[in-house]
Amino acid sequence: MPATKPPVKLRFECQSGCTACCDIEGFVYLSEEDLRKAAKFLNMSAVAFEKQYVYRTTNQIRLRKPRDRQCHFLKEGGCSIHPAKPTQCPLFPFWPEYVEDREEWVHLKKRCPGIGKGELIQIGTAMEVASEMKTAYPSFYEEWD
């Protein structure tokens, strides 16, 4: 649940060649659609993709983490499954935990060089994007609403 008010001003622009968001400690979560889309992109069955790359529990699906990095698909030069990357990836940094909490947004700026750059983004627009995270991963955000 958000601890403070949303940020007053949101500016964000991806920086060319940057993969800092891919190296932030955490997990890459998947929806069932994300799993199918990535498997298809790699010309694998969903079952084979899941066996090789996915960790599943009753309430969540996420990519397994390799020992030496955050994601199997982060290669030098970027994401090797870019056209089929999981929902959470292109929505970053407009996740509810950042957009709805001013302190978290400010803290994230230390790790993301694109925050504070680019055009001003309306908070309503950022909240709409954040709602896509809530739709894709409802079990993570049940207590937020």
Image: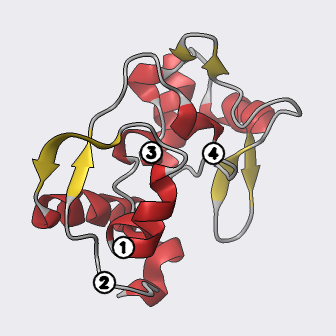
Q: What element carries label 4?
A: loop
Q: In which quarter of the image is residue 53?
A: top right
What residue is disc 2 on?
5
Q: Is mark 3 on a helix, strand or loop?
A: helix
- Which numbered disc covers residue 24? 4
Q: Position of residue 40 (x, y in %)?
A: 50, 23
Image point 45% across, 48% down: which residue? 88
3 or 2: mark nearer the eye: 2
What residue is disc 3 on?
33
Foreground of the two, 13 or 35: 13
- Quarter of the image for the C terminus: give it: bottom left
Kind of residue at badge 4: Ile
Which class describes the residues within 10 Å of circle 3: few (<14), some (14-19), or many (20+)? few
As drawn, 60 above or below 81: below
3 or 1: mark nearer the eye: 1
Tag 1 near tag 2, CB within 8 Å? yes
Tag 2 near tag 4, CB within 8 Å? no
Q: Quadrant of residue 3?
A: bottom left
Tag 4 near tag 3, CB within 8 Å? no
Left or right: residue 19 compared with residue 129: right
Mark closest to the chain's N terminus, 3 or 2: 2
Q: Can residue 137 be seen in this view?
A: no
Q: Which residue lies furthest to the right in this view?
A: 67
Kind of residue at badge 1: Arg
Q: Position of residue 34 (x, y in %)?
A: 48, 41
What residue is disc 1 on?
102
Image point 12% across, 66% down: which residue? 124
Q: For the residues marked 3 and 2, what is the alpha-carbon distance in whole angstroms?
A: 32 Å
